[in-house]
Image (cartoon, grey):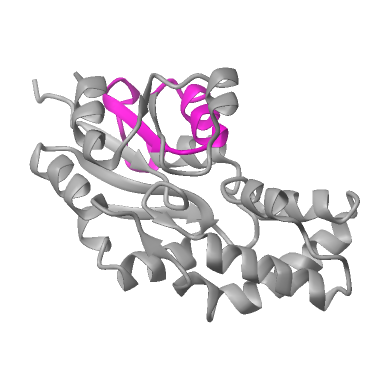
Amino acid sequence: MTAAKLTALVDLDGTLTDPYPGISASILYALEKLERPAADELALRAAIGPPLEGSFAMMLDGDPILAKQALGHYRDRFGTVGLYENAVFDGIPEALGALRDSGVQMFLASSKPRVFCEKILDHFDLTQFFVRVHGSELDGRYADKSELVAHILSVETIDPAHCVMIGDRRYDIEGARSNGIKVAAVGWGYGTVEEFDTFPPDAIVPHVVDLAPAVLKLLG
């Protein structure tokens, strides 16, 4: 009987890269196009991780039509400029390399549109570490992390018992929990102590250098 393949599903924003400059500038651009007040830093940071249309709705008094319009303006800027206003966290290529060399197959699992994820990974030479890139679609499919993780487990025929989700926000934790997989929350992203207290992961990884050992321990 063949042993199950060890697998990691890996978030992008706040986990592999720090996207704040590009995301925040593109959100502010969208709000300006709609002639609405600028969002403050707290709202901008909170928008990194969850589906963006919902974040825009919160900034726009719950108006779903304005939220869709804002998302369109956001993508106009982000898709050409904002996605490159981004930086890989120090040590990430080495950590991904260590996991790959230890026999872990990795799939990107991001709520960001897949087309943007692919461009970002190519730009930063991170595509090499992943079997395949999964993200949301521009029509909104798979923007919910639980739905995305379920989709990946199904199409890639992954055994949940031998899979770990790596991410930085409650959405990664909830997406993992709803699909019966373990989760490692990283301490260098946009999740807060309060967030991890409320939505406890299986492990909190304080530093990038600790990532591969922590994930390998969870995969046991």
- On screen, residue 68 versus residue 65, left or right, reads left
- On screen, residue 2 versus residue 12, left or right, reads left
Q: Is residue 130 visible?
A: no
- On screen, residue 177 versus residue 209, left or right, reads right
Image height check: is 29 above or below 52? below
Q: Report the magenta residues as a range.
A: 153-181
The quadrant of the rendering that contains the N terminus is top left
The quadrant of the rendering that contains the C terminus is top left
Hey, which residue is sitting farthest bottom in the picture? 80
Query: Residue 184: image x %, image y %?
Result: 37, 29
Residue 157 part of the magenta-drawn span: yes
Query: Residue 136: image x %, image y %?
Result: 54, 54
Query: Residue 202: image x %, image y %?
Result: 39, 19
Image height check: is 151 above or below 72? above
Which residue is painted at 88% across and 68% down in the image? 36
Could you say which is closer to the camera, residue 137 or residue 26?
A: 26
Could you say which is closer to the camera, residue 141 or residue 74?
A: 74
Query: Residue 76: image x %, image y %?
Result: 64, 78
